[in-house]
């Protein structure tokens, strides 16, 4: 029986798939009817057109571990990782040439809009490796990773499933800050590193200079470097043979009990949580019962397969292979990234897992409309399944109502999370000023980590006797002529210089210890501005150091707005307070009563602005008469304004919260 839908959208495809899942033993046809034409699409695997043997069935048993290579692509932002991934997928026939979608593995809308990779993506490729002696078919698992520092957690998870990495460097820009960071991530994971110099077709390309940089900074042999151009395809034919020859196969044992890494997960409306896994030991088949080390819960494997590059069911996974499993998980708390999965009724040694994500920035998220709290809660729960590096805790604000306090790996990570909430889930949110975690010691001897300035104690009997703030180790690579202005910028941000050297005659390498609070908002933008866009910047978290910090409150008509409170260094409190009240004055609308905006440290007001009231001309009807009549009317209006100021509430527009994000 055919189903008719006057729609040619992907929604119609979803409906057809849903119908097929309900009644899989019946042959259904979905007929699209639009503009007078009809197209028919079969959706049943056992239809009369599919009675023949399927030549596309993948037999993973042909690939023992010695014919498997797991590798990732790591590089600085915009050095060509995703484009190289596209060309490798085309070379192996995984996707068609001229498929019309650049950066095929960047599937999120935010990735395409910003031109950056946010989520690590896996694709399985099959490659015929021809030598003089033989022709052997290999299974290659490629993982395309993000390049921005905020997503280094994604990179570390990806590297855990690999035995090697392609280190891609731009032939014109050379080694950049995130190149250094990603190299050491791979080096610490004991991966085989294959250096690749990309974009050699550019007029400003200088591969010989970049080879020298790789030699001096990472001790990589210049003769091992591959020269490529992902845009033209030049040199890419040497990449996969190098992967097969240089990267070792997975070290797992096929005759041992099953052990799987849970690498990543995301939520599907029909299947529930889809987990990306790497089979370290043993094998897995559809219908098997598995358990989680972290939660102790058991599941049945409902579907298992590989990403080729879309989900492709195979019915099983063997040692060393990377793929996906569907277990019917419905809660985001069940799919813990870094978990070890194993067969029930067996005993295994848990895999090492990953370092827990260290949250560097905290911000409050509130629904723009208070009645949308449940919708926001549902959206955050779904999105955190796809981004395990976000921490979420409920909180409430007197100004904004119920919301969430979320921890992020950095400011770009926070910005991308907000954008995905709005684009993928249609939510409208208000975000508070981003803060970093501080440690305070009080006079009663207690030590408390404060992530939310609103949680700062207001008890006058308990005073702060010591405080510590988090710092980062920042790596900055710049052209030599900008050294002076960058040193001045780091000094203004209370930085301590740790290292200063020259990579070559044109570029300098600098290492600083900087307070996290000083770089969290606009440091990177300012660094790019003063170096004409040539600086590259990367950081890693460091220890807490003693610091003199204070809580800065914002008061409207004498009432503190907890959502706008922030913690700043005492030396900068005066300037930050002045900037905050100036910005708020521009964005808060005038009311029928006077509004006083104040910035205060404790009971001491350090900055103030006043928004005058909207006034009605009560003297308009007085064409003459005694002056006392006019004074009486003005006094009556004045008393009314005072009364209104006591009982009236100030509406704070969303733009005001966005504006104060720019104040450091």
Image (spheres, helix red, strand yellow):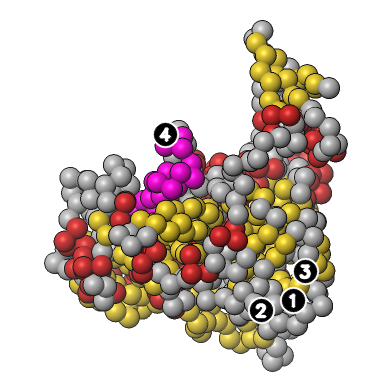
User: Which residues make up the magenta segment?
Assistant: 77-99
Indicate the position of residue 44 as horizontal and vertical percent values.
Answer: 75, 34
Q: Specify few, some or many for label 3: CA neighbours under 10 Å numbering under 14, 14-19, or 20 or more.
A: many
Q: Position of residue 183 (x, y in %)?
A: 38, 70
Observer-side mark, 4 or 2, equals 2
Task: Give the side of residue 633 with respect to residue 537, left or right.
Answer: right
Q: Quadrant of residue 232?
A: top left
Residue displayed at 83% across by 22% down: 1
* Rendered residue at 73%/17% (across/down): 6
Residue marked by disc 4:
98
Distance of label 2 from label 3 (alpha carbons): 15 Å
Q: Label 3's element?
A: strand
Residue assigned mark 1: 293
Q: Is residue 98 magenta?
A: yes
In the image, which disc is placed on residue 290?
Answer: 3
Residue 81 coordinates in the image, percent (x, y) = 40, 53
Q: Which residue is mark 2?
A: 256
Disc 4 to disc 2, how far (Cα)? 43 Å
Identity of the residue drawn at 67% across and 14% down: 38
Depth order, front residue of 622/522: 522
Depth-wise, is mark 2 or mark 3 nearer the camera? 2
């Amino acid at each position: 029986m055919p189903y008719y839908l006057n729609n040619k959208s992907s929604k119609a495809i979803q409906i057809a798939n849903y119908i097929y899942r309900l009644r899989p033993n019946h042959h259904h046809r979905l007929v699209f009817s639009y503009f007078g034409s009809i197209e028919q699409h079969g959706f049943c695997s056992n239809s009369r057109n599919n009675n023949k043997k399927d030549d596309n069935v993948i037999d993973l048993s042909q690939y023992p571990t010695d014919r498997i290579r797991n590798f990732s692509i790591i590089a600085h932002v915009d050095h060509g990782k995703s484009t190289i991934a596209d060309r490798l997928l085309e070379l192996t026939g995984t996707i068609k040439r001229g498929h019309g979608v650049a950066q095929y593995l960047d599937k999120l809308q935010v990735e395409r809009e910003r031109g950056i990779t946010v989520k690590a993506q896996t694709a399985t490729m099959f490659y015929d490796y021809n030598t003089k002696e033989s022709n052997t078919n290999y299974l290659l698992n490629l993982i395309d990773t993000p390049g921005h520092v905020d997503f280094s957690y994604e990179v570390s998870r990806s590297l855990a499933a690999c035995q090697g990495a392609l280190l891609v460097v731009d032939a014109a820009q050379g080694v950049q800050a995130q190149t250094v960071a990603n190299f050491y991530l791979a080096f610490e994971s004991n991966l085989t590193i294959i250096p690749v110099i990309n974009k050699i077709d550019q007029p400003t390309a200088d591969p010989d200079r970049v080879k020298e940089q790789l030699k001096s900074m990472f001790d990589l042999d210049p003769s091992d470097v591959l020269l490529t151009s992902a845009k033209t395809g030049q040199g890419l034919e040497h990449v996969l043979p190098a992967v097969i020859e240089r990267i070792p196969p997975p070290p797992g044992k096929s005759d041992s009990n099953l052990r799987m890494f849970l690498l990543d997960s995301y939520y599907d409306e029909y299947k529930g949580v889809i987990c990306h896994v790497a089979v370290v030991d043993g094998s897995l088949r559809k219908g098997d019962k598995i358990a989680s080390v972290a939660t102790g819960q058991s599941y049945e494997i409902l579907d298992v397969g590989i990403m080729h590059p879309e989900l492709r069911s195979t019915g099983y996974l063997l040692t060393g292979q990377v793929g996906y499993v569907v277990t019917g998980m419905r809660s985001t708390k069940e799919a813990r990234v870094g978990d070890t999965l194993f067969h029930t009724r067996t005993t295994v040694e848990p895999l090492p897992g990953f370092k827990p994500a260290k949250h560097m920035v905290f911000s409050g998220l509130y629904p723009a409309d208070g009645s949308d709290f449940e919708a926001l809660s549902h959206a955050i729960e779904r999105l955190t399944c796809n981004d395990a590096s976000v921490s979420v805790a409920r909180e409430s604000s007197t100004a904004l109502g119920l919301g969430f306090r979320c921890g992020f790996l950095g400011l770009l990570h926070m910005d991308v999370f907000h954008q995905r909430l709005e684009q993928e889930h249609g939510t409208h949110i208000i975000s508070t000023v981003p803060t970093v975690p501080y440690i305070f010691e009080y006079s009663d001897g207690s030590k408390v980590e404060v992530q939310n300035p609103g949680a700062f104690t207001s008890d006058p009997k308990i005073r702060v006797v010591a405080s510590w703030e988090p710092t980062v180790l920042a790596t900055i690579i710049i052209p030599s002529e900008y050294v002076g202005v960058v040193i001045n910028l780091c000094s203004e941000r209370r930085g301590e210089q740790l290292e200063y050297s020259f990579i070559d005659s044109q570029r300098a390498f600098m290492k600083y210890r900087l307070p996290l609070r000083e770089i969290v908002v606009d440091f990177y933008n300012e660094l790019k501005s003063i170096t004409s866009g040539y600086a590259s910047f990367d950081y890693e978290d460091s220890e807490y150091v003693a610091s003199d910090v204070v809580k800065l409150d914002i008061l409207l008509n004498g009432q503190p707005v907890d959502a706008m409170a922030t913690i700043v260094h005492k030396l900068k409190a005066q300037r930050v307070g002045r900037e905050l009240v100036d910005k708020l004055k521009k964005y808060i609308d005038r009311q029928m009563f006077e509004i006083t905006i104040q910035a205060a440290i404790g009971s001491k007001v350090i900055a103030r602005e006043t928004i005058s009231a909207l006034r009605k001309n009560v003297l308009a009807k007085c064409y003459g008469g005694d002056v006392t009549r006019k004074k009486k009317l003005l006094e009556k209006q004045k008393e009314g304004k005072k009364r209104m100021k006591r009982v009236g509430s100030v509406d704070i527009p969303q733009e005001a919260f966005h504006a104060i994000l720019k104040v450091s």
